[in-house]
C-alpha cells in the first residue's frame, strides 16, 4: 500500500491494521471513526500525510509510533485522549497543537519526536511519564492552568529546552522531570509547589533557583 482512505461507513477498526506498511505515504479517514486504535500505523516510516476525522476522540497507544516521515498532523478539536507512545519516535514531527479538551496524554506519547515547542492545555488531568523525553529540538514548553504535576522524566534529555512556563496550579515536580536539560538556566517554581522529586533538575543548566516556602518535600 502507498495510500489508503478509510470510508465513513467504518465505525470499528482493529489494532495493528496498517502496521509496518513501509511504502504507505498518505492516509485519510471518513467521519465514522472516533478512535485510531493501538499500533494502527506503527512502523509506517514513509507516512507523511494523515487526515483525521473531526469526530475523533482517541488516538490509541503506539498509533503513529516510528512514523519517521510524519512532519505534521492536525489534531481535531474534539480529541480527548492521546495514548501511550502515540507519536514516539516521529522524529520529523516538529510542531503539533494539542487542543483544549484533551484530558489524557499517555506515557512516552511524544518521546523522541522533532517538536520544537509545545503547549499542554489546562484540560489535561492525566499526564503520563516520559511524555517529552529525548525531544532534542524542543526549546520551549508551556502548561495551562489546571495541571498539578510535571510527572517523572517528562523532559529528561531535552538538551535544547531553554524556556518553561509552569502553571500556578502546579503542586509537584516529579523525579528526573528536567534531568539533562542543559540549556535550562532558569525555572520559576510556582508558589503552590509542595514536592520536588529526586534528581528533578540533575545536570540541568540552572544558574540560580528559588525554592518557595510551600515546598515540604524534596528528593
Image (spheres, rainbow, N blue to C red):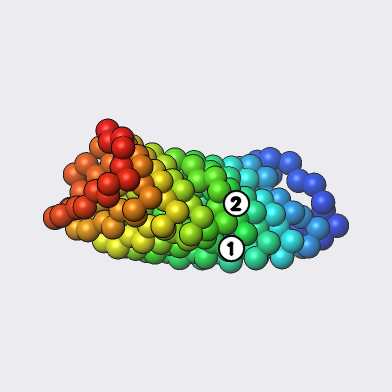
Which residue occupies 50% across, 64% down?
Answer: 96
174 sits left or right of 58 in the view: left
Which residue occupies 20% across, 49% down?
Answer: 204
The residue wearing badge 2 is: 103
Q: Is residue 125 above or below residue 143?
A: above
For the C terminus, the quadrant is top left
Q: Residue extending furthest front? A: 213
Residue 100 is marked as: 1
**Residue 126 screen position, x and y as percent:** 54, 45
**Residue 30 screen position, x and y as percent:** 77, 62
37 sits left or right of 171 in the view: right
User: Could you tell me if residue 129 is visible in this image?
Assistant: yes
| Mark 1–mark 2 CB contact (< 8 Å) | no
**Residue 60 screen position, x and y as percent:** 63, 45
**Residue 214 screen position, x and y as percent:** 32, 45
For the residues labelled 1 and 2, the Cα–Cα distance comes to 8 Å
User: Could you tell me if residue 183 is visible in this image?
Assistant: no
212 sits left or right of 40 in the view: left
Label 2 secondary element:
loop
For the N terminus, the quadrant is bottom right
Which residue occupies 70% across, 58% down?
Answer: 56
Amino acid at each position: 500500500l502507498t495510500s489508503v482512505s478509510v470510508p465513513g461507513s467504518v465505525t470499528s477498526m482493529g489494532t495493528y491494521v496498517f502496521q509496518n506498511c513501509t511504502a504507505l505515504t498518505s492516509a485519510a479517514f471518513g467521519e465514522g471513526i472516533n478512535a485510531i486504535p493501538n499500533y494502527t500505523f506503527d512502523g509506517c516510516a514513509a507516512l507523511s500525510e494523515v487526515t483525521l476525522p473531526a469526530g475523533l476522540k482517541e488516538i490509541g497507544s503506539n498509533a503513529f509510533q516510528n512514523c519517521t516521515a510524519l512532519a505534521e498532523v492536525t489534531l481535531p478539536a474534539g480529541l480527548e485522549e492521546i495514548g501511550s507512545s502515540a507519536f514516539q519516535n516521529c522524529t520529523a514531527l516538529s510542531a503539533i497543537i494539542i487542543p483544549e479538551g484533551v484530558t489524557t496524554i499517555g506515557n512516552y506519547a511524544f518521546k523522541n519526536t522533532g517538536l520544537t515547542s509545545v503547549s499542554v492545555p489546562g484540560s489535561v488531568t492525566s499526564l503520563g511519564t516520559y511524555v517529552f523525553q529525548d525531544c532534542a529540538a524542543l526549546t520551549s514548553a508551556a502548561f495551562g492552568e489546571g495541571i498539578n504535576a510535571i510527572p517523572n522524566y517528562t523532559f529528561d534529555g531535552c538538551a535544547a529546552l531553554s524556556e518553561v512556563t509552569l502553571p500556578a496550579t502546579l503542586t509537584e515536580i516529579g523525579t528526573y522531570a528536567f534531568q539533562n536539560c542543559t540549556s535550562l538556566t532558569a525555572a520559576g517554581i510556582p508558589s503552590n509547589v509542595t514536592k520536588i522529586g529526586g534528581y528533578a533538575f540533575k545536570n540541568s543548566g540552572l544558574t540560580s533557583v528559588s525554592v518557595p516556602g510551600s515546598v515540604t518535600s524534596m528528593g
